[in-house]
């Protein structure tokens, strides 16, 4: 890759910390992203159900950040649960997994993290490395931290691979927030190449659509990039086509909540539109995500697209902008067919079409 990971870590120091584990009292602390950019407040969590509620209510959001949060939610099931035996602990963890998985049905990292944590617990009990609930808690803490550390390292690697697609002076269009707030690490997926370029002195700027109805682009992407001194311009969602037609964009870089084996990309609603316009205008479109975001088993017809409260569209921050009884269709994600995807960028390398052949090859999965 040509760039030393440890040296790069010393150059990237994001100001915002969206996920904090407080070991002294086994508490998960989350930056409340609903209140950004006007307030930086934190929520303390001590049980799996409140963690699931935090995910559902979008106190924390973004597939990798949800995965890390869910991992620590599983830790809370043991840290503050009532289990006195290892069998009871496994039952507590199974209930915690089910509660957490129900919080957001589309984000692949959520299910990946809870299954990994439950499997780790089961293996630790069966191989004798956890002989008590207290020892099991230690195993679970280490595994949750490993998930965080792996994500941090993966994002740096995605940033280095993605740097191949960034030239000095480029302007990159994003969608929603796939920055450090969405991943829990402060680096991000879609913003990883941008942050790496910025850290290395390569001039790069960002155009961020507002991302209705939750305005993650306006509230979060703009906020975190400005906090770290990265040039960013906010546009209305409806300006995306005109901005690209004007030649103001060199490439599109988005994150993903799920990527299928054949290259279908599930990401925040509005991504499909960007991909189609980029394809029409000859602008490269890249989806950037860690290997944990890939779902190699599901087909398009298997994936449930989450729909949320109609009032998210009828109102903005609680203020009505439409008749209160108007019917609303509010899908949170859309799916981008592989024909519109130039490449997928992962911590294991860049994946080019044909995706059904190259995704399992690069990810080393049969």
Image (cartoon, helix red, strand yellow):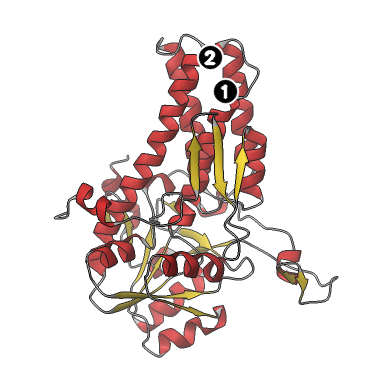
Q: Residue 60: horizontal and vertical position, in percent?
A: 57, 50
Q: Nearest the camera: 234 or 354?
A: 234
State the SS at label 1.
helix
Residue at left 25%, top 52%?
A: 10
- For label 2, the crowd category at 10 Å Cα-Cα, with few meaning under 14, some 14 to 19 and many 20 or more, is many
Q: Residue at x 42, y 57 (%)?
A: 15
**Res 123 quadrant in image:** top left
Name the residue furthest left: 2
User: Are the residues flagged by discs 2 and 1 in contact, CB closer than 8 Å?
Assistant: yes
Separation of residues labelled 2 and 1 (CA atoms) = 7 Å
Counting other residues with Cα less than 10 Å from the Cα at mark 1, is it few (<14), some (14-19), or many (20 or more)? many
- Report how many numbered discs are placed on residues in the image: 2
Q: Earlier in the sequence, mark 2 or mark 1?
A: 1
Mark 2 lies on a secondary structure that is helix
Does residue 54 appear anywhere in the picture? Answer: yes
Residue placed under numbered mark 1 in the picture: 78
- Look at the image and tell me in which quarter the N terminus lies: bottom left
Q: Residue furthest front?
A: 24
The answer to whether one can see residue 358 in this image is no
* Residue 263 circle label: none
Q: Which residue is mark 2?
A: 133
Choose top left, top right, bottom left or bottom right for residue 173: bottom left
Compared across the picture, whether 162 is left or right of 136 comes to: left
């Amino acid at each position: 890759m040509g760039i030393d990971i440890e040296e790069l870590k010393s150059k990237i120091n994001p100001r915002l910390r969206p996920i904090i584990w407080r070991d002294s009292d086994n508490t998960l602390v989350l930056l409340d992203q609903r209140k950004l950019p006007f307030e930086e407040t934190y929520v303390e969590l001590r049980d799996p159900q409140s963690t699931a509620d935090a995910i559902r209510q979008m106190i924390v959001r973004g597939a990798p950040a949800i995965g890390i949060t869910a991992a620590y939610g599983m830790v809370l099931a043991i840290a503050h649960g009532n289990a006195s035996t290892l069998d009871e602990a496994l039952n507590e963890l199974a209930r915690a997994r089910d509660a957490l998985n129900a919080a957001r049905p589309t984000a692949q990292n959520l299910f990946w993290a809870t299954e990994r944590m439950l499997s780790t617990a089961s293996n630790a009990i069966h191989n004798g490395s956890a002989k008590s609930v207290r020892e099991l808690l230690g195993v679970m803490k280490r595994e949750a931290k490993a998930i965080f550390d792996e994500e941090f390292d993966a994002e740096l690697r995605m940033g280095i691979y993605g740097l191949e697609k960034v030239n000095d002076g480029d302007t990159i269009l994003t969608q929603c927030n796939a920055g450090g707030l969405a991943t829990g690490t402060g680096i991000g997926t879609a913003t990883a190449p941008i942050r790496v370029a910025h850290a290395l002195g390569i001039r790069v700027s960002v155009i961020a659509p507002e991302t209705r109805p939750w305005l993650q682009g306006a509230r979060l992407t703009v906020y975190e990039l400005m906090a770290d001194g990265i040039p960013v311009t906010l546009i209305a969602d409806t300006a995306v086509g005109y901005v690209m037609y004007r030649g103001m964009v060199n490439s599109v870089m988005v994150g993903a909540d799920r990527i299928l084996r054949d290259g279908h990309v599930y990401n925040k609603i509005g991504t499909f539109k960007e991909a189609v316009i980029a394809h029409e205008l000859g602008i490269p479109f890249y989806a950037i995500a860690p290997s944990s975001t890939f779902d190699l088993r599901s087909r398009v017809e298997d994936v449930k697209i989450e729909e949320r409260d109609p009032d998210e569209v009828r109102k903005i921050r609680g203020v009505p902008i439409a008749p209160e009884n108007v019917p609303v269709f509010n899908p949170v994600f859309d799916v981008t067919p592989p024909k519109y995807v130039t490449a997928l960028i992962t911590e294991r390398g860049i994946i080019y079409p044909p995706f059904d052949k190259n995704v399992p090859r690069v990810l080393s999965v049969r």
